[in-house]
Structures are given as structure tokens and as C-alpha cells.
């Protein structure tokens, strides 16, 4: 299994999407942090550039997990910001997984 498949399997096994929103987010945070992910991680594309702050990142595997809230996908501006951030982090060798929640 890949790291992403492992993560999805863990999320499903713990039935996190059956909880209320805040309980779900706490469960995701707990699972990620106990598996080597750092919360509110900053990535600097190049020296002197503004940082890109992500929800969770594993700096060893260069894997980012972003938690996208209810209105996240419905706003064109936010979609463009996310797309730009994803392009910047991909150039630096990172992979991003977005978990959409209600």
C-alpha cells in the first residue's frame, strides 16, 4: 500500500466521518500527528519568499494533507489559491492530499 492508501485506510477504519465536524477534525489531527505529520507546517519555495502554510505535512516523505472545509470548493478564488500553492509545492517535490469535509 502507498502512504496515501494507508492514510485513507486509517481514516476509514476509525469511522471518523461518522462523527460531528469538530470531533472529526480532532480525530484526523490525532491520527496524522501520531503518524509523523506536523500541524500548521510552513514551506518556503525559495529564500526570501512568502511561506506556504499547510494544514499538515510529513517533511520526511514530503506529503501534505490539507483539510478543506464546507465552502472551500465552492469559491473560485480559493480554488485558484489552492491550485497555485499545489503547483509551488509540487515543484519542490511535495505531494498533496486534500480531505474535504462538511
Image (spheres, grey):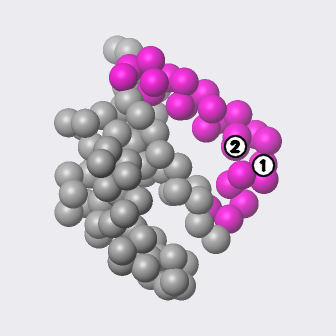
Residue highlighted by disc 2: 78
Point out residue 102 in the picture as x, y percentages from the top left corner. 64, 71
Residue at the top extreme, as displayed: 47
Whether residue 52 is in magenta: the answer is no
Assign a secondary structure to mark 1.
loop
Please report the residue visible at 20 percent of the width from the left and 52 percent of the height from the top: 36
Front one among 8 and 96: 8
**Where 25 sits versus 36, above or below?**
below
- Looking at the rendering, the stretch of residues picked out in magenta corresponds to 69-93
Magenta stretch secondary structure, dominant: helix
x and y percentages locating residue 17 in the rendered image: 51, 76
Query: Is 29 rendered above or below residue 40?
Result: below
Q: Residue at x 32, y 44 (%)?
A: 2
Q: On the image, numbered disc 1 is attached to which residue?
A: 75
Q: Is residue 40 visible?
A: no
Q: Are marks 1 and 2 in contact (CB under 8 Å)?
A: yes
Q: Horizontal placement of 76 versus 84: left or right?
A: right
Q: Is residue 12 visible?
A: yes
Which quadrant holds residue 7?
bottom left
Position in image of residue 96 (x %, y %) = 46, 39
What residue lies at 38% left-to-right and 15% top-to-bottom? Answer: 46
Residue at left 51%, top 83%?
A: 18
- Would residue 72 be found to the left or right of residue 11 on screen? right
Q: CA distance from mark 1 to mark 2?
A: 5 Å
Amino acid at each position: 500500500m502507498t502512504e496515501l492508501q494507508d492514510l485513507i485506510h486509517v481514516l476509514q477504519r476509525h469511522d471518523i466521518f461518522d462523527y460531528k465536524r469538530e470531533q472529526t477534525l480532532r480525530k484526523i489531527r490525532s491520527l496524522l500527528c501520531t503518524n509523523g505529520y506536523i500541524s500548521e507546517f510552513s514551506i518556503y519555495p525559495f529564500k526570501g519568499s512568502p511561506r506556504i502554510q499547510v494544514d499538515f505535512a510529513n517533511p520526511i516523505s514530503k506529503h501534505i494533507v490539507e483539510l478543506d472545509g464546507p465552502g472551500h470548493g465552492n469559491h473560485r478564488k480559493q480554488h485558484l489559491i489552492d491550485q497555485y500553492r499545489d503547483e509551488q509545492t509540487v515543484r519542490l517535490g511535495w505531494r498533496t492530499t486534500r480531505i474535504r469535509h462538511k
